[in-house]
Amino acid sequence: MTTTTKNVLIVDDEPSLRLLIRAVLEDDGWTVHEAVSGEQALEMLPSLTLNTALIDMRMNGMDGMTLLTEIHARVPGLPIIMLTAYGNVGSAVVAMKHGAFDYLTKPADNEELKAVMAKALNYSRLVDENERLRSAVKVTERMIGNSQVMRNVKELIEQAGPSEATILVLGESGTGKELVAEGLHRASHRADKPLIKVNCAALPADLLESELFGYVKGAFTGATTNKPGRFQLASGGTLFLDEIGEMEQVLQAKILRAIQEKIVEPLGSVAPVETDVRIIAATNRDLKAEVEKGTFREDLFYRLSVLEIRIPPLRERPDDIPALVAHLLEKLGQKNNKKVRSVRPSFLDALSRYSWPGNVRELENVLERAIILSRSEVLGTELLPPQVLSSQTYTATKSDPADSAHKSDETSLPRKITSTSLDDAERHALIDALESNQNHRERTADALGISRRTLQYKLKKYGLTRR
């Protein structure tokens, strides 16, 4: 079903009746599909997106009641209207008890037909709306955490999802920007269409342009066929432009035009192609600062940021760490074929004190490392990497007294921790990670669970670029 169309399937073996109903419904804005039998209707069903169906009770071969049951098994919630002769109203009433939406006696009065179809359309749209909301809830359930800041993010997804506005998702690397984009798409009226993702930092400008806008045969050496771009592939759906802050200005101008005019020009073509996409963009950069520096177009920034959703870094929501740990232990335990029940209090205490420069992605890496190295079903601090143990507010050794005192203890709640300076803690964590990896940037980034670009940014931020 879909909320933007009026599609109906008429199933009747009488051509004159189908012709009459078709004329009335097409005049009322419906797109009509016809089948002469129940068997043909079931063959057509997978290729159709329907709002309702009109089914004759008595047909040669499969009867209307059997077809009703078959369609409901394949398209649950589709409102089906039964057509019956005046003397067989009792059969139609029985059909309604088995899930039919309504019935009409033949020949149907035109106004009555339109009224019943309008009710079926409203019902199908309510069903579709509920399905979209349930889908969006499933995505937000994957966003682990019940802190106030995370509740705010989930509420914004539910509120902004159904709109057509462009949305800018802000957050550090590893916070879950892609998950937010998925939630917004699933909560939208475009949920049954594609969500196409593009990482703007992963490709050089010329390749990124061809990926976004496509090209025609002969546009450049090696272009042996026409290739549609991501804008065309996302038609009717959502285009997620991740790390848009890395995009060069020449390409920014073309993106702006595509958003404003809803057209793109494939490379090598002079014929513009219409597009119908919703744009969601994400970045770990401060785009306002980039605008002031002249590296990001101001007009594009305002086009993208109709609504901004900021995902808080993990250090701003330490209360969510226990829930994240519980979720990741189960997920990573299954992935690595290890049974892990819980963690010791000191282990969770150390996690709660650390500043997590790599955010949830780094936490996942730390937990997976601990699970792989563990010989027990309960994780202790001896399994934590040096950068976590040597953070500003926590010091531990393999003979951690907390572990000794609670050898058999498990925990689900961290102690309340406050840090005098999260920036200092993050700086010290970076220094420790660099030293542990002999100042090798790539290994340090991997250990922290962050990209090398993010590591470079943080080293510059804390004046550590010369290390």
Image (cartoon, helix red, strand yellow):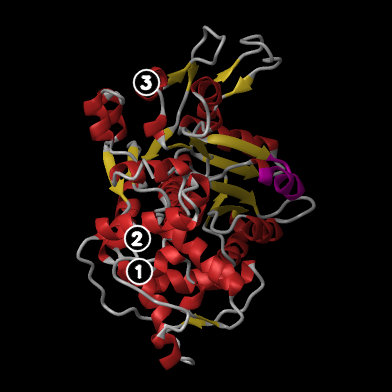
* Magenta span dominant secondary structure: helix
Q: Which mark is residue 314?
A: 2
Q: Which residues are magenta?
A: 35-46
Pointer 3 residue: 249
Q: Earlier in the sequence, mark 2 or mark 1?
A: 2
Quadrant assignment, res 152: bottom left
Identified by mark 3, the residue type is: Gln
Check residue 419 for magenta coloring. no
Quarter of the image for the C terminus: give it.
Answer: top left
CA distance separating discs 2 and 3: 32 Å
C-beta proximity under 8 Å, tags 2 and 1: yes
Pointer 1 residue: 320
* Numbered disc total: 3
Q: Is residue 407 left or right of residue 253?
A: right
Secondary structure at badge 3 equals helix
| Mark 3 surroundings within 10 Å by alpha-carbon count, few (fewer than 14), some (14 through 19), many (20 or more) | some
CA distance separating discs 1 and 3: 38 Å
| Mark 1 surroundings within 10 Å by alpha-carbon count, few (fewer than 14), some (14 through 19), many (20 or more) | many
C-beta proximity under 8 Å, tags 2 and 3: no
Residue at 66% in and 12% down: 217
Q: How far from the left and from the top, in percent, is residue 239?
A: 46, 35
Q: Is residue 85 left or right of residue 235?
A: right
Q: Nearer the viewer, residue 220 or 114?
A: 220
Q: Nearer the viewer, residue 409 or 463?
A: 463
Residue at 49% in and 39% down: 6
Where is 413 relative to 223, above or below?
Answer: below
Q: Is residue 442 visible?
A: yes
Q: How far from the left and from the top, in percent, is residue 377?
A: 57, 83
Quadrant assignment, res 67: bottom right
Residue at 52% in and 72% down: 329
CA distance separating discs 2 and 1: 8 Å
